[in-house]
Image (cartoon, rainbow, N blue to C red):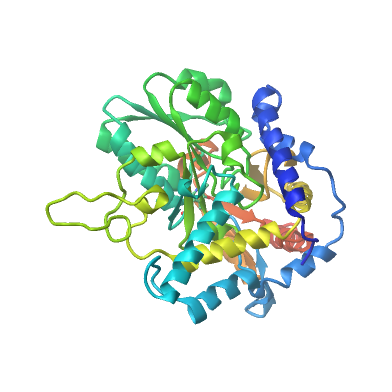
Amino acid sequence: MIVEKTSETDRREFLRKISRAAALAASSPVLSTNAGAELSHIWPSVETDSNQPVHNLRNQFPLLKERVDGRPLVYLDNAATTQRPRPVLAAMTDFYAYENANPSKTLHSLARQSAAKYDRARDHVARFINAAGPEEVVFTRGTTEAINLVARSWGEANLRAGDEILLTVAEHYSNLVPWQLAARRAGATLRVLDISDTGHLRLDQLDKLLSKRTKIVTFPHVSNVLGAINPAKEICERAHRAGAVALVDAAQSVPHFPVDVQELGCDFLAFSGHKMCGPMGIGVLCARRELLEAMPPFQGGSNMAHEVEIESVPDFAEGGLKFEAGTPNVPGAVGLAAAIAFLQSLDRKALWTREQELTRYALSKLQKIRGSRILGPTKSQERMSVFSFVIENRRPLDVATSLDRAGIAVRAGDLASLPLLKRLATEAAVRASCYIYTTKDDIDKLVAGLEEISGVAN
Ligand SMILES: Cc1ncc(COP(=O)(O)O)c(C=O)c1O
């Protein structure tokens, strides 16, 4: 394991510091557009120059040792999905091998054990993001389903003709299409917050867009294209001042740095397990309890309703369970809890400092590729290690295909964010994205591949 286990006290102290960072970000006009800088300012610098510790960490991930057509895999598609470490794989295999049962709190032993595991996973998630309690956590299939749940259920109860939904031009389709559909159902209108040419949200335009008609403000905590870290606490506060609720798409932030929902002050927050070493098919919606209680069910079925008769509308289950119709994804929740435990066993301060260093390194190298244009902020403190770029006269898909031949896995295309790409004068881009196990060596191989493609090599 790369870094020593942190004690519970250290973890709490760390969370407290992060919370303070978020509060400062909201109150300082300088920092408010620069949440990333604030995070790196608060976290002390640690010695990370050597690749040695990360090699130990990589040993936990069997897939990183795979070869592609005989070449070692260079996995740089982590914003799409990360790889899983052995403890997560073991937790899921063990569940199926020794503990599998459809959960029930009152039936046979295995069923009770399965129910207890599911409950424990919910507790674990709640503590990880500092939710007020496990009843604020809804297990979903992922970020996409979490957002659809809000758009459907909260939208049905709260959106009316003439209302406005405020989102940004930087949304992933998962936080755009559900709102387009909700707006169409209700006769509401979408209002769109722009970005600057450097990829920062135009917060100077926020107050002009907010009005009494605004019912919800939603935005990505971190852009899946630009890597830009948005000042979530400030945006939530400004949404609340206008009388709106705030939903944070945290698919790209929760995997990288601690997120405290109470400190952010958001009403809804969504993320996916598979982007943080957990399984596919499990994600989380965290929602304020009063909001969840007032929302109608998203889907109907067993577990969310009991003692149902043909003629009577049932009483629904409380908390997250009301939104989890049918047999739950217990192995997914168990795997997600194992992923959280795995991340918590690492020194996340050190990981973040390493990520910042890797970001600086990658930016400086990628900027030198002939004809390259990197999308998003170029200051490492304002962003994470997600690098989307275009290369003059090279089609992004061709670039990705050439890299693949060298064993380098990147993503290319519209990145589920066409409006953002169009705003930045392109319709497709290549995206290389890192995670806790990415090394400078991976970046060097990417850069060598790109130099060849752009015609610098040979
Ligand atoms: C910012 C953002 N939001 C939402 C999603 C959708 O996540 P999922 O496909 O896990 O539901 C993604 C996935 O890439 C994302 O990057």
- The image quadrant where one finds the C terminus is bottom right
200 or 424, nearer to the observer: 200
Q: Is residue 100 positioned above or below 83 on the image?
A: below
Query: Where residue 171 appears, x then y in whole percent?
Result: 48, 41
Which residue appears farthest toward the left when viewing the image?
311
Residue 180, can we see it?
no
Q: Residue at x 70, y 63 (%)?
A: 449
229 or 303, nearer to the observer: 303
Residue 311, can we see it?
yes
88 or 334, nearer to the observer: 334
Q: Is residue 295 positioned above or below 52 on the image?
A: above
Left or right, 385 with respect to 188, comes to: right
Query: Where residue 328 appears, x then y in whole percent?
Result: 39, 63
Q: Residue at x 33, y 26 (%)?
A: 163
- The image quadrant where one finds the N terminus is bottom right
Query: Where residue 439 appears, x then y in whole percent?
Result: 76, 61
Query: Where residue 223 appears, x then y in whole percent?
Result: 57, 43
Q: Residue at x 55, y 29 (%)?
A: 235
Q: Residue at x 84, y 54 (%)?
A: 48
Which residue appears farthest toward the front when viewing the image?
106
458 or 242, nearer to the observer: 242
Number of numbered labels in the structure image: 0
Left or right, 312 with respect to 275, comes to: left
